[in-house]
């Protein structure tokens, strides 16, 4: 997951904030289009898109929320 | 107060003295309609713009808002240039719209190379000036929408067509109503909110250029916004911010993209006191209808003539609208027709009946809606097809829980290249993405490229496109 964040940041030529648990995703340096790309690529890699699988999933705010959503989905 | 065929925006705002108190606010300025009575955002140059075709391009949405209030009824035509629209399209828009004047901010006027004789500076600060205002002619309002070639299409409205959907009259509590929108007011969705707020006697909080979403939400919360609109993607992004809870709206509106149940439920959880409404609207068709029951899709009973005057039908699977809110015509492209012979606009949005509700399932023309911005697949395919190893390419939408859809592309390689090893393929995909990045806006660049053995072609020789 971290490598996907880094790859998209590199492609978009933006500086990525250190990916700590409490990092607010919107303050990571990436925009919502970048998150859309990360979610699509993670689906290609892991075979799961937890957001589309469960429409009522709470929208993640911090990096740890995002990680947990994938942890739960791949259990 | 609704502008009649005979009145300008200024007439509508000043007919009732009470409306004068409604204000427009950016991050740096607050201006009431009353402030404009004896002052001007155009530094005393309104007279020079009489009967001209005026392109408005400013960083500040508030500056454009003020110019519009002054120019309606005076200019022959106003062309609204959105903040994020590429600068390199300006000459095309000026030529197609036959602009002979430009209203821009200080920065723009210094960089002036518009090729028109009249350039007027406009900003958020007012200067003393008095010019006769009000209806001296009917002004055409031109909005940009996406075209297949990558260049925008110029769509003509009038104040009457833009405001035909605004039925809410000024109410006694209008002064307590504070509107805001995530949209740019130079786009149809944002312009609706600008006019709705002004004509309803309410105030409007406008986003500032490059303002981070968290800052905007904090400001919107502090200003006590009661009514707010955006696309589902705007809302998903807002709910990703810890500042989303600063907002306590009474009314939340969504439009511009397919609305799914997830975003409606998330908004309901975040704002339990708000009425959540989603609307179908497009630049060409205007506002079609509103759905207020908190469910995705729309009830089949909406078909036919509605109380608000719009007529809705589904034909060949797509939504058609006939109303007084549709655009008049396109500029430039004479062949492009807006309405059929019965006066209906085919929106191209495909709707499917499940039970007693219709659900939007995509577009007939394969147009991909990325967070409210429409992307024509041909534009991306053209870039991919230029690559020497590509035989043919198909750009398509892939559902995204963040931006509604994102662009991906299926690519068929020339036969000799099919045996390439994995490393070569990875490098080639990266090369194709880079080529798109150089040629296209970020939201049009494919998030992923898939190498496929073949693509389906229809009997008429065109690429088969499924609803995005």
Image: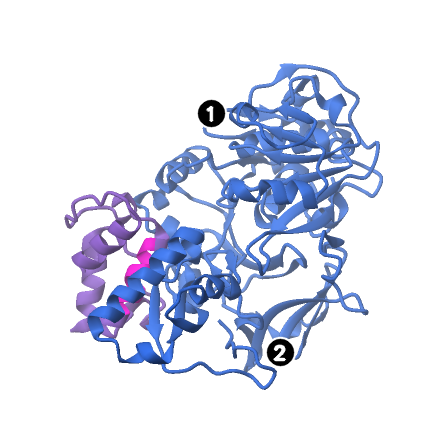
Question: Considering only vertical position in the picture, is B156 above or below B265?
Answer: above
Residue placed most toward the observer, B320 or B357: B320
Q: Quadrant of residue B447?
A: bottom left
The purple-tinted chain is A
Chain that bears disc 1: B
Q: Look at the image and say whether residue B405 sits in the magenta stretch.
A: no
> Residue B317, which numbered label?
2
Crowding near the residue tagged with mark 1, few <14, some 14–19, many ≥20 C-alpha atoms within 10 Å: few
Residue placed most toward the observer, B194 or B202: B194
The answer to whether any part of residue B196 appears in the image is no
Please name the residue that numbered disc 1 is placed on.
B28
Q: In the picture provided, is B109 more to the left or to the right than B398?
A: right
The blue-tinted chain is B
Where is residue B402 drawn, in percent x and y?
37, 59
Mark 1 or mark 2, whichever is nearer to me: 2
Please give the name of the residue rendered at 81% of the width and 39% of the height, measured from the top-left corner.
Answer: B138
The answer to whether any part of residue B404 appears in the image is yes
Task: Give whichever of discs 1 and 2 has the lower sequence position.
Answer: 1
Whether labels 1 and 2 belong to a single chain: the reply is yes
């Amino acid at each position: 997951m971290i490598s996907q964040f880094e790859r998209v940041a590199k492609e978009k030529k933006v500086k990525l904030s250190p990916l700590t648990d409490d990092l607010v995703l919107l303050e990571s340096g990436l925009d919502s289009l970048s998150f859309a790309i990360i979610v699509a690529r993670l689906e290609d890699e892991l075979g799961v898109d937890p957001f589309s699988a469960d429409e009522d999933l709470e929208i993640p705010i911090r990096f740890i929320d995002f990680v947990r959503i994938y942890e739960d989905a791949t259990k | 107060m609704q502008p009649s065929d005979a009145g300008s925006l200024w007439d509508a705002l000043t007919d009732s003295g009470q409306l004068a108190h409604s204000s427009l606010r950016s991050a740096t300025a607050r201006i009431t309609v009353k402030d404009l009575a004896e002052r001007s955002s155009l530094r005393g140059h309104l007279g020079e713009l009489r009967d001209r075709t005026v392109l408005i391009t400013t960083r500040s949405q508030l500056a454009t808002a003020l110019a519009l209030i002054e120019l309606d009824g005076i200019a022959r035509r106003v062309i609204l240039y959105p903040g994020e629209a590429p600068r390199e399209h300006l000459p095309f828009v000026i030529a197609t719209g036959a602009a002979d004047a430009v209203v821009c901010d200080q920065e723009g006027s210094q960089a002036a190379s518009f090729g028109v004789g009249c350039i007027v500076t406009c900003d958020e600060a007012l200067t003393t000036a008095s010019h006769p205002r009000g209806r001296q002619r009917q002004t055409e309002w031109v909005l940009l929408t996406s075209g297949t070639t990558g260049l925008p299409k110029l769509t003509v409205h009038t104040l009457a067509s833009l405001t035909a959907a605004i039925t809410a009259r000024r109410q006694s509590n209008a002064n307590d109503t504070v509107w805001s929108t995530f949209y740019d007011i130079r786009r149809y969705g944002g312009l609706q909110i600008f006019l709705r707020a002004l004509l309803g006697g309410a105030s409007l909080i406008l986003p500032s250029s490059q303002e981070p979403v968290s800052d905007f939400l904090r400001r919107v919360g502090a200003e006590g916004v009661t009514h707010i609109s955006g696309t589902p993607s705007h809302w998903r992004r807002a709910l990703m911010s810890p500042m989303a809870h600063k907002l306590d709206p009474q009314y939340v509106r969504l439009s511009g993209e397919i609305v799914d149940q997830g975003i409606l439920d998330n908004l309901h959880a975040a704002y339990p006191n708000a009425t959540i409404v989603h609307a179908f609207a497009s630049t060409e068709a205007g506002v079609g209808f509103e759905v207020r029951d908190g469910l995705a899709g729309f009830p089949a009973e909406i078909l036919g003539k509605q109380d608000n005057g719009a007529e809705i039908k589904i034909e060949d699977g797509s939504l058609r609208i006939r109303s007084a809110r549709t655009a008049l015509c396109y500029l430039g492209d004479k062949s492009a027709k807006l309405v059929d012979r019965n006066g209906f606009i085919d929106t191209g949005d495909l709707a499917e009946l499940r039970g007693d509700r219709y659900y939007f399932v995509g577009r007939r023309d394969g147009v991909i809606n990325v967070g409210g911005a429409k992307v024509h697949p041909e534009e991306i395919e053209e870039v991919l097809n230029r690559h020497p190893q590509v035989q043919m390419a198909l750009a398509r939408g892939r559902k995204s829980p963040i931006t509604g859809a994102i662009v991906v592309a299926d690519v068929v390689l020339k036969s000799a290249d099919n045996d390439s090893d994995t490393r070569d393929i990875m490098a080639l995909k990266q090369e194709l993405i880079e080529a798109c990045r150089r040629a296209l806006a970020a939201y049009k660049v494919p998030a992923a490229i898939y190498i496929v053995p073949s693509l389906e072609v229809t009997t008429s020789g065109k690429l088969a496109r499924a609803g995005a």
